[in-house]
Amino acid sequence: MIRHYSARDFDWVLLGITMAITVLGLLEIYSATRNTPWREAYVRQIVWIGLGLILLWVFSAVDYNILIRHALAFYAIAVALLLVIMFFGQVIGGARRWLPLPGGTTLQVSEFVKVVLVLLMARFFSDLHPERVSVKNLLKIAGLFAVPMFLVARQPDLSTALSFSPILFMGVFVAGLRWKYVLVLVLAGALLVPLAWQYLQPYQKERLITFMDPERDPRGSGYQPIQSKIAVGAGGIWGSGFSRGSQTQLRFLPVPHTDFIFSAYAEETGFVGVTLVLALYLAMLMKIAGNAQTSADSAGMYICMGVGALVLFHLLVNVGMVIGRMPVTGLPLPLMSYGGSNLLATFMLLGLVNNVRLRRFTN
Amino acid sequence: MNVYSNSRKTAGRPQVAVFQFVAATVCLWLLSGFWQLQVQSPDIYAARAERNRIKSLPLLAPRGKIMDRDGRILVDNRPTFKVLLSRAAMREEILPLIAEGLHIPYEQLLAQLRRLRTSNTPEYQAVILKENLAPGDIAFVESHRAEFPELELIRSQKRLYPADGSASHVVGYVGEISDTELEQLEFALYEPGAEVGKAGIEREYNDVLSGSDGRRVVVVDGLGREREVRGNVEAKPGRSIRLTIDLDLQVVSELAMEGKTGAVVALDPRNGDILALVSRPNYLPNKFVGGISVDDWRELVNDPRKPLLNRPIQAQLAPGSIFKPIVALAANRASAVEKDFSVVCTGGATFYGRYFRCHKPDGHGRVTLHEALVQSCDVYFYALGNRLGIDPIAETAMLAGLGEPTGIDLPHEEDGSVPSKQWKLRFFREKWYAGETISVAIGQGALTTTPLQIASAIGGLAMGGEWRQPHLVPHDEMQLIRDGYQPPAPRRAELDPAAVRKIVRGLWGVVNEAGTGVRARIPGYDVCGKTGTAQVVSRQYALDHADEQSSKDNAWFVGFAPCEAPEIVVVALHEHGEHGPIAAPIVRDVIKAYFDKQQRTRWTQRKNTSASDQRASNFSTPPPTVWRDGP
């Protein structure tokens, strides 16, 4: 049920922030890849941004209640796609996570699973009466999350699988949970850590160890965090200037346009540029939270809070990694990192936030 | 309407506020991290980024050449390749592959890198992995440029010494700078791995020969590829040095010493120029270039014949009878005996209760100084020494330069020892016994000298009391090398010309009057000389171990020519040669080569200057004046 909404209701500020971050990311992609085999990356990124804007409009226009109504169907499709990928997916860099599309491009299905899980979470929690989470319900929603998480972790892509959990966590948090349960959950988590260690890939263990002490293996697994910190520090207050960072331009930084784009950006724009972008992200998060508060119903609020949790989690993990305060993971920085799937998924999520805002006056 | 949402207004939910608070906290926490890196300590990271990208490669300066007095090359350079490993962008996992490709033991490579890590060498400084690359090694590096950007081929100049080790103890050799040398002021500007002179001229004039290395500073990327050249300091080649050595005489001396152990020194007593300097056995300096192998080094060090010993300046041995001219001079200076002092030799004499033998068991009969020198009569000099006492002998020996380094421009010269009353008191805290003087009078006992000291001492005596410091770099060359260089003043002594003349006549007789040195005779030339047979062990021990080479006497000969106005003085030491006369032909060969060359030069000069001159082509050098004024 598509109704006409006035352009005034559209969240132009959120879009503006989104575009500001996206364009800064685009410029840094151009700068960081100028002298590398990926020098065409920024062109592709522009195409993705264009597609993303269309998706943002689509996900704003279709009433989120309709989307939520079909959340289980979307969920089924997502799990089916993950299963398909498990057997027929394209292997890049040793992991089977990409769905080949006609035209030579690939999609990382797990990124779009985030959108589905946000809708599923919103549906599940807004359905609850009374809005208190019982153990049974908690196990139910956790089970629903566990299936895609398991499939993605098997790809293997542990960090993306873990990046689903903030959605669930946010749902439980907003719905409200008895302290008793929180305590049980924390204890269970603590017990699971040593168990999970057994199942980590050797390179993942290595990363966690070097996170504690990167200088232990400066040429191996410690190389990325060390070079990233050097790049950030060398930028100083004002930065080395656009496309003039030696760490970035001379390729001491690994993957300066994807996972470590914020290192490259920090080197070339300095503390000033970093402050600007972090302020933009904070403004975006505040805006998302604001939309959650003005939502017409709890489903809308859950959607906004789910999106906010995702963005904050990625920001924390990616930027934390850049300054050596988080272990090295493959999580991209939303809107800035080069990569179509994450960009499209993020635009879809932000479209949903807008969707909620557009319909805040219903009822 | 909304089936899946309740109608409750959601505004004001505390959880949203908590989320906003958490989001702000996270952003501030992240920003504080950037503050720490970018505002508080950016210099550290800027420096590390700089170290990442700036690579400094040495441009090695070729060492100066070493030439003989006529400009003939003794030590040259040849182009070689070495491979450098830049550690700044090194991946550990390539090390086994590189070790295999370059045929370096892997453990040795790891040990080398560990050593550098513990020293304070900056990481951007490339290290030399292997020198003197074989063609196969060069091909390996060339064909794996893409896989191993850490490796870099460097073309450099390597030392090339005469293949047979000719003049090895003069020129010395080069080697990698040692840790102790690195701490010395002289090598303050050198870095680990640098090649410096280790012995001989290479060591003594290292600062002149080595020049200064250049440096190429380049910007590299994370893959180790060169992006731009930042600075280029050209290498300044080392200065070449011309020596006083005459290659012709050097070669003749070496041929004469073939298969023997000992030394030859040829010296021009008029100016101190060393014309030839030989030590046998020798070593091959080429083996030291680029690092001597452990086996080769062990062989050199464990060789009982001590090839590394530079005998002309380091062998401190009893001179034996070649010391007698000095004793004769001492007797004159102290006016110890009357002019026609003579002694009856019966094959030995008893002094202070001990019987001292003459080398001729039948005895020489009545001998004066002239006969005593010609026949090398020991009894005469026993008596002379007894009359003199030790101190006048020591005084004259030291006047002639014995007992102290000559000051030759070679490292590690020894001083020998000249015993005296004071000397014994100082080193043994004992009184001198008059009986000890008897041995010293024939060049035995506690007296030790180096061959070079003997050459200088006898040369100065022959010059009538003028001793010039021996040297290997000529004065005119020194003036070019060192600012404000002044040739050292000769040491002069007022000697009685008649006494000098008398001694020189005796030495002429040694060679020309059926004396002990007849084998040094060169028909047509005045050659003077003196034999020496020096005991190395006690007479009893020698009798008991007569078959052992090491207990045989050392053979010495010192000769100079022309007798009246000497141009060349030559000392030959043939260790365990048994009889002094054995060393005489060595000296004769060198002196003959000297005069032959002089003749040849005169002849070619004359031919060149006036080819049209009929009379000039009639080769008519006046025959050399031969001293016929015998006793």
Image (cartoon, rainbow, N blue to C red):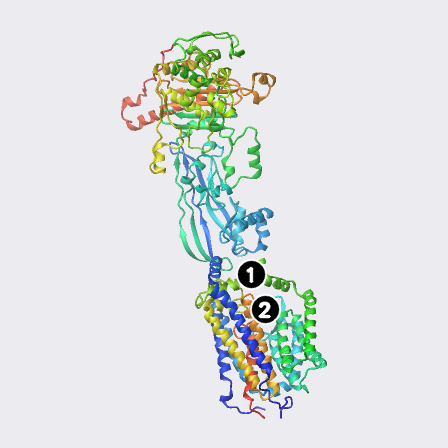
- The three-letter code of the residue at mark 2 reads Gly
Seen in the picture, residue A255 relative to A115 is either above or below; the reply is above
Residue A211 in percent (x, y) is at: 59, 63
Say which chain tag 1 marks.
A
Q: Secondary structure at mark 2?
A: loop
Residue situated in front as seen by the camera: A179 or B479: A179
Q: How many marks?
A: 2
Residue situated in front as seen by the camera: B554 or B419: B419
Seen in the picture, residue A155 relative to B46 is either above or below; the reply is below
Local crowd size for mark 2, using a 10 Å CA cut-off: few (<14), some (14–19), many (≥20): some
Which residue is the site of mark 2?
Answer: A330
Q: Is residue B193 visible?
A: yes
Label 2 and label 1: CA atoms lie apart by 15 Å
Residue B112 in percent (x, y) is at: 56, 47
Residue at image coords 68%, 69%: A190
Residue at image coords 57%, 34%: B299
Q: Quadrant of residue B455?
A: top left
Which residue is the site of mark 1?
Answer: A223
Residue B10 in percent (x, y) is at: 60, 87
Mark closest to the chain's N terminus, 2 or 1: 1
Q: Secondary structure at mark 1?
A: helix
Q: Residue furthest left?
A: B613
Residue situated in front as seen by the camera: A90 or B335: B335
Residue B508 in percent (x, y) is at: 40, 15
Q: Residue furthest right?
A: A136
Residue situated in front as seen by the camera: B310 or B29: B29
